[in-house]
Image (cartoon, coloured by chain):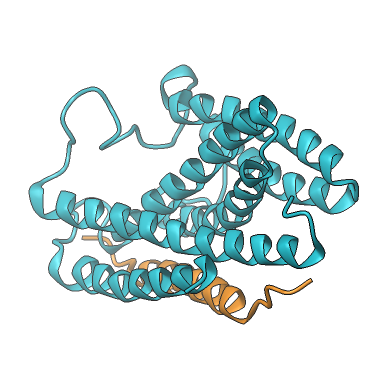
Amino acid sequence: MPQNGGYMVAAYIAAAAILVGYAVVLARRKPGP
Amino acid sequence: MTIAQRGRWVSLVALIFLAGVYVRALVFTPEERTQGLAQKIFYVHVPAAWSAMLAMGLVGLASILFLMMKDYRYDRFAAASAEVGTAFSLVMLTTGPIWAKPVWGTWWTWDARLTLTLFLFFLFVGYQLLRGAVNETSLRARYSAVLGICGLVLLPFIHLSVYLFRTLHPMPIVLKPSAPSLPPSMLITLLSSFAVFTLLYIGFVMQVYGAAAARDAAVGGGR
C-alpha cells in the first residue's frame, strides 16, 4: 500500500483552514453600510 | 432572529458535522488498496466540487429569475452564492492537486476537467470583481446576471468533460446514470460529506445574503 498519508493530512488541514477561516470572516462581518 | 444570525447557527452546526465527517473518513472508512491514504482526500474534494457547482448553478438560476422579474432579492442571492462558491472552489482547487501529486505524480495538468474547474474559479472571482466595479445598482445587477448565466452554461461542460475529452481525471462515481461504484462504507462517508458541505453552503449563503439585505435596508430602498 502506498505511503502517502502526509498528503491526506495536508489536504484535510487545508480544507478545514479555508472553511473555518471563511466562517470566522462571515461571523465577524458587520451588516451595516 | 435575522437571516444572518440563523445562518451563523446553521454554519456552526455544519462545521460540527464536518468534524464528524473528518473522524468518520480518517478513522472509520477503509483505506483504498491502490491509492492508499491519499484516496481519502476524495471525501473533501468531491463534496467541495459539488458545492462549488451547486453555487454556480444557483447563481445562474437566480440570474435568470432576476432578469425575468427584476426582483433584487434574486440579485442579492446570486451575489451571496457566488461569494460562497469562491470559497468552495478554493477548497476544490487546493485539495485536488494535493491528491494528484501522489496519485498522478504531478500537482497539475492542463487537461479538460482541471482547466474547466479553474475557469469556474475565475468566473466566481470575475463575477465579484464585476460587481465591485459597477456602482449603479440596476446596471450591476444586469451585467452580473449575464455573467452568472455564462457560469451556468459552463457547468454541464465541467461535469461531462471526462466523457467528452481525453482526460486524466477520474470518471463520476456517484452522479452518473448507473449505480454508485463504491463499497457501502465509503459511499456512506461520501454521502455524509455531500450533506455536510451542502448544509455549510446553506449556512454561509444565509449569512452573506442576510448581511447584504440588512445593508441594503439600511441605505434605503431595499434593492
Q: Is residue B36 left or right of residue B108?
A: left
Work out whether B59 lies above or below B65.
Answer: below
Which residue is more in the foreground, A23 or B137? Answer: B137
Q: Position of residue B220 (x, y in %)?
A: 80, 60
Work out whether B142 lies above or below B75.
Answer: above
Residue A4: which quarter of the image? bottom left
Q: Position of residue B179 (x, y in %)?
A: 15, 30
Q: Is residue B79 left or right of residue B139?
A: left
Work out whether B99 lies above or below A6.
Answer: above
Which residue is more in the foreground, A9 or B63? Answer: B63
Which residue is more in the foreground, B210 or B218? Answer: B218
Would residue B175 be visible to someone looking at this image?
A: yes
Residue drawn at (34%, 32%) of the image: B171
Q: Which chain is orange?
A: A
Residue drawn at (24%, 73%) of the image: B20
View extreme (left): residue: B184
Q: Position of residue B73 (x, y in %)?
A: 63, 46
Q: Is residue B106 left or right of residue B222?
A: left
Q: Which chain is cyan?
A: B
Q: Position of residue A5 (x, y in %)?
A: 32, 70
Which residue is more in the foreground, A21 or B45? Answer: A21
View extreme (front): residue: B221
Residue drawn at (28%, 71%) of the image: B17
